[in-house]
Image (cartoon, helix red, strand yellow):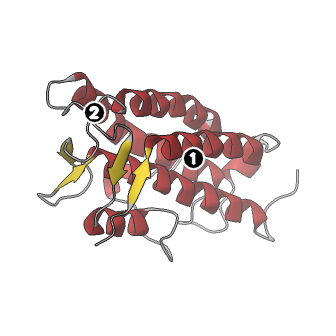
Amino acid sequence: MATNRRTLDELESWTRRITQESRELTADLDEGQRQWRREPGRWGVADCFEHLIVTGGAYYPTLERLLASRHAVPALGGAGSYRVGWLGGFFARQAGHQGKGRRRAPKGLQPRPDSRPDAPERFAEQQQTLLRILAAARRADLDRTRLKIPTVPLPVRFGLGEILYVLVSHQQRHLDQARRVRQDPAFPES
């Protein structure tokens, strides 16, 4: 049976690209454009990035503590690569950029109703934390270092590599969503 192996190099490159594209997407938007919503209950550009900031806040401290602890299994051979299993792949498809249709974010991960217009800049700053986590993860066995996803109420543990993959894929999903908001025919002109 073939395994779906991926690498931290891919995740790091993807993270840097998402950060750059988020800057390019929002650089010329004024406050009103960043906070514009097509209708109540729909997300605007700032909401997409605020959600990613809140999500990072839920995951990154746990990942940093894990990587600084003795619970991270040291990498031996194949450092920097990991396997995405069927359940990790399922979560990546649901929460990530391949997911189809709208989904309601868990209550604790929804953006505030008054998402700040500086959310894209704060997201780009928070990406530095993710890059530090990816660098620290190189010392861990990404398959055997396992943890529970903090936002999923299932008693299932995932490999560290799978969780990092889901997080970056999730960022791509919301970058694409912010791009669609900006492409909406009703989006206000500057």
Say left or right for 176 vs 170: right
Q: List x then y, in percent, for residue 74.
A: 22, 30
Q: Kindly identify the amino acid type of the residue bearing the numbered disc 2.
A: Ala
Query: Which quarter of the picture shows residue 59?
Result: top left
Comparing 131 with 113, the one in front is: 131
Which percent across, then down, holds residue 11?
49, 45
Q: Residue 145 is drawn in which quadrant?
A: top left
Q: Which residue is mark 2?
A: 140
Query: In this orientation, which residue lies closer to the viewer: 109 or 38?
Result: 109
Crowd tier of the residue under label 2, counting other residues whose Cα lies within 10 Å: few below 14, some 14–19, many 20 or above: many
Tag 1 residue: 14
Residue at left offset 76%, top offset 43%: 24
Q: Residue at x 61, y 39 (%)?
A: 16
Is disc 1 placed on a helix, strand or loop? helix
Counting other residues with Cα less than 10 Å from the Cα at mark 1, is it few (<14), some (14-19), or many (20 or more)? some
Find residue 95 and report its horizontal and vertical position in percent: 41, 63
Give the total number of marks visible in the rendering: 2
Element assignment for label 2 = loop
Left or right: residue 75 versus residue 119 is left
Residue at far front of view: 77
Q: Residue at x 64, y 44 (%)?
A: 17
**Quadrant of image for the N terminus:** bottom left
Residue 116 visible, this orientation: no
